[in-house]
Every structure is written in C-alpha cells, then in structure tokens.
Image: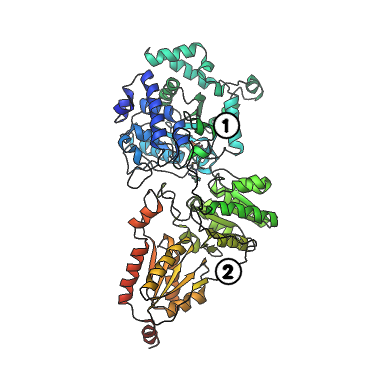
Amino acid sequence: MSQHLETINAPPDVKKLSLQQLAVLADEIRSEMITGLARNGGHLGPNLGVVELTIALHYVFNTPKDKFVWDVSHQVYVHKLLTGRRDRFGTIRSTNGLSGFAMRTESEHDCYGAAHAGTALSAALGICAARDQRGSDENVIAIFGDAALTNGISFEAMNNIAHTTKRFIGILNDNEWSIAKNVGAISNYLNKLITHPSYNKLAKDFERFIRRLPKGELALMLARKAEEGFKGALTEVSLTPSPSTVETDGRGGYGNSLIFEEMGIRYLGPIDGHDLPLLISTLEFGKTCDNPIVIHVLTKKGKGFEAALKNPEKYHGLGPYDVATGATLPTKPGTPPNWQDVFGNAMVTLCKKDSTVVGITAAMPSGTSLKILEKAMPNRYYDVGIAEEHAVLFACGMATMGFHPVCAIYSTFLQRAYDCIVHDAALQDLPVIFCMDRAGLSPQDGPTHHGLFDISYVRSVPNCIAMAPKDEDELVDMMFTATHERHPTFIRYPRGPAEGVPIKEQPKLLEIGKAEIIQSFPNNGGRKIALFPLGNMMSMGKKVAAQLAAEGFEVAIINPRFVKPLDAGITEFFGRAADLVVTFEDHVLMGGYGSAVLEFFNEKRIPTPLVMVGWPDQFIEHGTNVDDLRRKYGLTVENTVARIKAELADAAPAERRSDLAVA
Ligand SMILES: Cc1ncc(C[n+]2csc(CCOP(=O)(O)OP(=O)(O)O)c2C)c(N)n1
C-alpha cells in the first residue's frame, strides 16, 4: 500500500509532505519501481539511485515552470511517478505505453527529451540563455551522471556556461558507474573528490546559509548537523578525509574542485545523495546562487534492491526479473546466440590470428559484447568512455599505423561521429571497421535508439563499403573480410538472437560488392518476382517467397550482402528478368538500400517496378517488441505479399517491357 505515493498527482503534492513522510515516500517509490518493472524490465538500477534526489528536486523547484534537463534521461522514472504518470507506470517501455525516457510530447514536466548521453549541460545552458534573453526567472537544473563527463559535449558546455549565464544549476549524479564501471581520467578525478574532500569556502557559505534558514523542521535538523560541523553532514561514502591534499595541492584547498572552478562554476560537494534533508537544503542553496553552480551528489546505483546493488552493470537496464531474487529469465533452450556474442567471439578469433586487429567500445562493453575480447585479450581492447567521436578518431589514428581497429558502436550512437566518419575515416580512406550494433529496432527504447539511418548516412560517403549479413556465419565472414580491406567498412546487424546457423571453422573472404543468389527463377512459366532481402530481412524474404511460390509465382531470392558497392551484374540481371523487384531492409526507405537499387535502375534505365519494404519517413515510436511495430507499419509477410500482388496486377510482363524499352 503506497500511503503517500498515492496522494501525489503532481509536484505540488510532494511539497505537502513532512520530511518523515518524504522518507516513507522514497521507500514507496522504490518498491513501486521494483515490482512495477519486473514484468517488462527497464532502467532499474539508475532509478533506484535517484529516488531521494528526484524527490528533493520536486520539493525545492516547481516544474513545469522550472526546468529539469536530464542527461540520457534513463533515470526519469521517479520523476514520472511524481509528475502525474503513476497510473500508467506499468506501461513503461511497452506498446502505447509511457516512454522509458523524458519526452516533450509525453508531459509538460519533460522540458527536454533525450536518451543519448552528454546533451543535458548544453541544452540546459540554451534554456538559461533563452530565459535571460526574455528576462524571466525560471530555475534551470541539468542532472547529469559521472559518465556524462566522459563525453566531449559536456565539456564544450562547461567551457561556455560562465560566459553565458549567471544562473545555472548542475547536479552531478555520481555513482561511479557508467553502464559498466566508469573509465578514464575524469572518473579517477571524481573519485579523488569523493575520497579526499577539501572543505573550502563554498562549503562555509553553505553552512552559513543553513544557519540562516528559518527554524522549521528542516532547518532544525540541518542546524544540528551543522553543529557537528559541515563534515558531519556528509556520509561515510565521502568521509575519508585526507588533510594532506589541502596542504599539498598548492591551491589552498581548491585543488580538488579545480576542474569546475577553473571553468567559473562554483562547486559544492560531494554530498550524500540519499540524505533528503541535506539534498533539500543544498538545492535551496543552489537556487539562491548568483553564479553557475555544480552540486556533486553521491548516489548508489540500485539502492534498495540487493541484486542490483551487487551487480550495477546488469541492473543498469534489464529485461523481466524475479521481484524476490532479482533473477532474470533464463534463455530458452535452443535460442540461437545473440549477434553481439557472435561478434565478441569473432573478435577474439580475429585478434588471435591478426595482430593488427583491436576492439574499441564507447562505454558499451556488455551491450556490444566486446567484453568477451576484454576478458580474453585485455591488451587489445579499449573502452574510451561515452565518446563516439573520440572512438572513431582514435581508430583512425591507429589505422594510419597499419592497424585494423574495430569500432563496435550502436548504429544510433555512431550518428554522433558522422563528421569523423566523413572527414577522417572516409576522406583519408582508412581501414577502420565499424560494427554497427542495434541496426534495426531497439523496440522498448524507441526512436532515440532505433538504428534506422546508418545505410543512408554511410551510403552517401565516398570510399565506404557497407554490408549486412543474413546470418551469424556471414557476420564472421564480413568481419574477416573487413580486416583485409584498405577502406572504411561498415557492417550492420541487429539486436538479439541471430539465425541459429553453424559458424564455419575458417571464415571466408567475401568478394567486395558481390551478392549471393539464394534461389533463381525456376522458369516454370509463372510471373517473376525477384526478392532482395537485406541482412536480417532474409528470413522474412524467405517467408514471402514461400507464399508467392505456393500461389504459382516464380520467385528468385538474392542476398545483397553489400549495400555499397551494389552488385551491378546481379542487380541488373534480375532487375531485367523479373516482372517485379522487391527490396527489404530494416532501415528507413529514404536513402536506404531500396533507394540505392532505384537509383541503379534509373541509371541503367531498367523499367521494372520496384516494391520497397522498409520503415517510413518518420520516427518510429517504442513498442513492446519488434513484431508489434512491424505489424503497425505493415512490415509483415502478409502485407508484403498483398502489396506485391497488387503491384504485379498493374505491371507489364518483363518480355513486353523490354520490347517497349527497345522500341
Ligand atoms: C551517445 C551515447 N552513447 C552511449 C549511450 C549508452 N548509455 C546509456 S546510459 C549510459 C551510462 C550513463 O552513465 P551515467 O551518465 O553516469 O548515468 P548512470 O546510469 O550511472 O546514472 C550509457 C553509456 C548513450 N545513451 N548515448
């Protein structure tokens, strides 16, 4: 029974509760999330970590007038529960349900949408600039994780904050984890701040502020803490004082907070992100600041759920689980291996045979399964943080030295690095290999995560070779082939289980730009349909073929393998021989594989009608699973067969068309 949560229909209801009641509310929210997410899964760990922080934010500020800008925004579940979306919480990440991220169209309390990391500081600063321009007085609060600071854009924003506005509040939600353990110098630096706090003048300002508060419930509690010294208001996570730092840093104790302060941003913290009174008073203080401020808050990912605390990486985002134990469902026996695991294992095999191959991830070792390489050959593995541009440039640098770096980056996150693909990898024609994971739908995440644009954005760039495997064995062949190439190569494959075919002992070198004929026309007098299902669309293509063949049509199936370069010979041959050509792609139609075939037909003056199966020119929402979304947008066997038959009814037979063309 959620005694307090049930009374919260909007943020003003949070303010009606006493501190004790808020603490109970925090417990209620945790159990609501732990039970509510068990059926569909979600970003459990990050949200369990920000319960008190989010309550405090809503206690102190007033959305929608005040603006909360969440980085990534996978941690907005508590915010959703407090902003009138509790009754739909069970629908999160499912078809027609709530999004798993902040979305401007979902609520007036979501002032900014996101799901890619590193956007919050810049967007919040833009909101501040607009506020200053129009002379209004909203508070703008950017909430960003420690891993967001591995991202370049966050630093670009920090460089700009003090020059742009006087009123900016940043909350650094530091749990020491990205999805995996956070990496790099920034992570070490933040760790230093946590373990060696120096109590500088800002802390004293804050102490004075607390003492001046009217003697309400909160003020009394905090004053008591202040009596014990400001240090006493911090929890044990931050209490390993090292006085030597203060003495020896040569900066009078400012050394630890240097990075923010040198950028003109006040720094306060670290404070315990689960201490509600302290959070509330610190945020109140932040509200009064007439300089940009960053408040460093320490939280525990997974707080309140033992399994999640023990394994923050797994519980960052997960599928259905058992509420009592946290155990996730075992994979059904007989399920093919995931594309990701095939990729990870192939990396180990390739690296063992070829000393020029290395693997690079931008903070996604488990998502991409590159952690398999990390475990087997740690010296051939690089995690560069949430820094896709840097990952690609880093790979380009290695490629100039004779290496074949493999960037394992989700299709959607690689969008970040487009200029690096064009200006660095392609223009210099470097043999960087891009393994574009999650090419296709990420159904529960939705439009921010679907990998539906990579063919368009790669196909238009000279020197690039782009491929899509029909099964996991071909994925390994493509990776092997790519390590023998002198050009940038791109391999796209989707999320989840592959096709279940055996993988050859020795991968095969594929001929660049050569398609594979799976099945030719049987030449039995029926009308001819040539199907070109790209990559993971092969299984759907085969089902369409079977239905058409059963109805007396002649069907050929071609596995294109390459989107660029196209197999000109095979595409032209089947293009001319068929009454109708059908392309299939798990990608937007605009600029995709079908477009490439259409351009080719135009160039060769092949008049055969073309049916293109793919995603329309719109952002595809989230859904419970791929099938739901494919059904909604007509990417089904039945719909495709119906479209083909309707199109064929209008199409002239191939022989008559070629007569017409010659005439
Ligand atoms: C550009 C980009 N790359 C990768 C990701 C995948 N990703 C989602 S959340 C996350 C880690 C975020 O860590 P942090 O910001 O510290 O928040 P926490 O989950 O620890 O609260 C990553 C790498 C992403 N969302 N965006």
Q: Which residue is mark 1?
A: 190
**Quadrant assignment for the N terminus:** top left
The residues bearing labels 1 and 2 have C-alpha atoms spaced at a distance of 47 Å
Closer to us: 420 or 604:
604
Q: Position of residue 380 (x, y in %)?
A: 67, 49
Q: Residues within 10 Å of mark 1 (few under 14, many from 20)?
A: some
Q: Is residue 211 at all visible to an observer of this figure?
A: no
Q: Position of residue 287 (x, y in %)?
A: 40, 26
> Image quadrant for the C terminus?
bottom left
Which residue is at the front of the view, 45 or 102? 45
Can you tell which quarter of the image residue 639 is in? bottom left
Q: Are marks 1 and 2 in contact (CB under 8 Å)?
A: no
Circle 2 packing at 10 Å, graded few (<14), some (14-19), many (20+), is: some
The residue that mark 2 highlights is 512
Q: Position of residue 208 (x, y in %)?
A: 46, 15
Which numbered disc, 1 or 2, marks the residue that appears first in the sequence? 1
As helix, strand or loop, the secondary structure at mark 2 comes to loop
Kind of residue at badge 2: Ile
Query: Based on the displayed image, in which of its 4 quarters is residue 22 positioned?
Result: top left
Decide: is 352 above or below 120: below
Image position, residue 607 (x, y; %) = 39, 78
**In the image, is residue 261 above or below residue 424?**
above
Describe the element under mark 1 as helix, strand or loop.
Answer: helix
Name the residue rendered at 39%, 16% in the picture.
218
| Residue at the image position 61 percent from the left and 63 percent from the top | 481
**Residue kind at label 1, given as amino acid type:** Leu
| Residue labelled 2 has its Cβ within 8 Å of some atom of ligand 1 | no
